[in-house]
Amino acid sequence: MLMVDDRPENLTALAALLSDMELDLELVSASSGNEALRQTLKGDFALVLLDVQMPQMDGLETAALLRANPKTRHLPIMFVTAGMQDNHHLFKGYESGAVDYLVKPIEPLVLRSKVRVFCELYAQRREIEFHKTHLETTVAERTAELTALTGRLREECGARAASEEAQRQLNEQLEQRVDARTDELRRAMDQIIESEKLASLGGIVAGVAHELNTPIGNIIMMSSALGDRMGELAKAVREGTLTKSALFAAVDDCLSATRILTHSASRAGEMIDSFKQVAVDQTSKRRRQFDLRETVHDILHTLGVVMRHAKVSHELRIAQGIRMDGCPGDLEQILSNLVMNSIRHGFGDSGGRIVIDAQRAGDKVEIVYQDNGVGIPPELHAKVFEPFYTTKLGQGGSGLGMFIVRNLAHGVLKGDIRLDSACGQGVKFTLTLPLVTP
């Protein structure tokens, strides 16, 4: 992890806050933006903690240069600042490539939690890359073996007409080896899919953690202000200077602070409940009865930060009372992948709109997902659900998102998914599922 700050005491403080984490961290320090750029060219980093206000080259300029370099384009950057908390500077920071902000004085628990999330995402990404490389190497090796075996068989058949029995035996052995290798590849693919699902859940975790900062910050600020106001009131009582107007003013202030505290706590509670339900569904694979509208609402709630940053609005047209029996985590994974696919591939900088509709059709439910993005050309429809097919290779797309969607829809939920799209007309995915999963 790279720490960038022009003040040595700040670097020392950051290192001290991260020294007792259970992660095996290698901390690299840089005292300027230029030194930080040199360090990123030397090594691979999971995260950069970047001070905003530095002489010569500030954090925003450094982040812009990191984003301009293909080698460091996707390096997560977390700004550290003691000021510049207004919306203008925050938006400017996000436009420069920041994934988050840390405001001084830094809360140790917040710092460690965010560092842990990005380190885990980095480790998962490296593991996926490793599995992919290993899979490609294995396929190449097995292809070479099969080619060599086939060549030897042709030579033997041409040289000796009496070797038909030997050829038959070799063909049987070959089929067995192909089946064994196919099983190995299938298991490797299953592992990659699980890693991709965990990476998706990790992104939701980061978004929820960021979203909780606002209501929790309001609670802390209002609690402090309420304490100060009550202290002033107590002092006036002790000194005998309390007036009726001052008492009424203090009561009004306390009531106002109480309303803000209640609203902020309720908002934080709703976000935590939504995320907890989504996380349990996606990790436990438990079967249960669930309300379709509530489940879709929960997944959209947990993706709220990502959708707002991408300027994406949504409309939910699912009626109350559609009850399903199955594993909601798989349905939540499908919808999460569709939303992220729209953000990454369908919408530009100006954002877009998503509409999710659902209707009962006998013992099935038909869920329609639509966006108003750039759409997909008809000639690419057959490739959309293929594994490792992506138009964003090297830019954060693994090519497994829609493959996982189809695998879950057909193989796990025993349903069907159809694509309807054209250039400039957005996409429409129709998901038909049984109300009770077999």
Image (cartoon, helix red, strand yellow):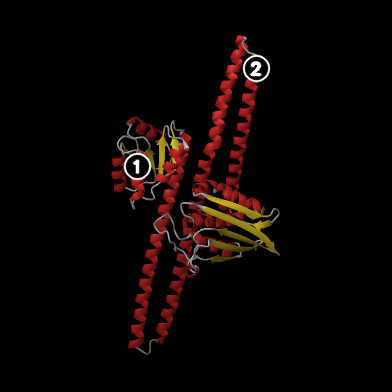
Q: Residue at x 60, y 39 (%)?
A: 267
User: Disc 2 marks which residue?
Assistant: 245
Q: Residue at x 49, y 47 (%)?
A: 309
Please state the horizontal and vertical placement of residue 367, each as a whole percent of the image.
Answer: 62, 60
Residue 54's place in the image compared with 142, above or below, is above
Please state the horizontal and vertical placement of residue 160, each as a whole percent of the image.
Answer: 34, 88
Q: Is residue 247 left or right of residue 92?
A: right
Please state the horizontal and vertical placement of residue 234, each as a whole percent of the image.
Answer: 61, 16
Quadrant into which the C terminus falls: bottom right
For badge 2, the amino acid type reads: Ser
Quadrant into which the N terminus falls: top left
Q: Which mark is on residue 434?
A: none
Q: Quadrant of residue 88?
A: top left
222 or 137, which is in the foreground?
A: 222
User: Disc 1 marks which residue?
Assistant: 61
193 or 61, which is in the foreground?
A: 61
